Image: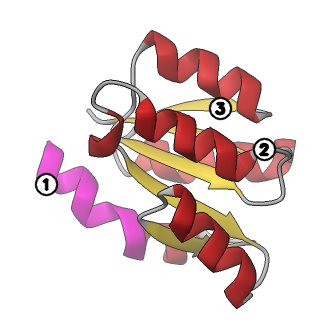
Amino acid sequence: MQRLILVDGSVIIRKVGKRILSDLGYLVTEAEDTGSAMTLCEGGLPAVLIVDACLDGSAEFIREVRALPDGKAVKIYYCLIEAKLKAMMQGKRAGADDFLLKPFDRQILTKMFADQARTAA
């Protein structure tokens, strides 16, 4: 089972995401801010990281994860409210692999993550 950390300031987004992603076979840990998420990452890197772009220090957090030993192996999704080029470029420059628009639902998360979960199983 792949570990996934969902970093978002919204309790609702974290609960919905955790329920759906757990159903897909991920071991999901929640973090409400980048500081908590960094502590989790220092204890053991996840296979997948979903980071809310609206959080303070989100781009810096991605850079810090990439700088950790094996940090380049983490699949990082930068979660945006809308597809704004400036925000997307900021995430890409920080080291994000891909983007996820929110609010998301079961259909969106299943489309993006089900194959990865099955591949790792």
Q: How many marks?
A: 3
Q: Position of residue 103 (x, y in %)?
A: 75, 72
Picture residue at 46% right of the left edge, 53% below the top? 76
What amino acid is labelled 3 in the image?
Glu
What amino acid is labelled 1 in the image?
Thr
Choose between 85 and 76: the one closer to the eye: 85
Residues drawn in magenta: 111-121
- Residue designated by label 3: 30
SS for callout 2: loop
- Select label 3 or label 2 by which is in front: 2
Picture residue at 16% right of the left edge, 45% below the top? 120
Q: How crowded is mark 2: few (under 14 residues within 10 Å), some or many (20 or more)?
A: few
Question: Is residue 102 toward the left or the right of residue 25 in the image?
Answer: right
SS for callout 1: helix
Q: Does the magenta stretch include residue 79?
A: no
- Residue designated by label 1: 119
Q: Which mark is residue 57?
A: 2
Choose between 89 and 42: the one closer to the eye: 89
Picture residue at 49% right of the left edge, 15% below the top? 42
State which tag comes first along the sequence, 3 or 2. 3
State which tag comes first along the sequence, 3 or 1. 3
Q: Is residue 4 visible?
A: no
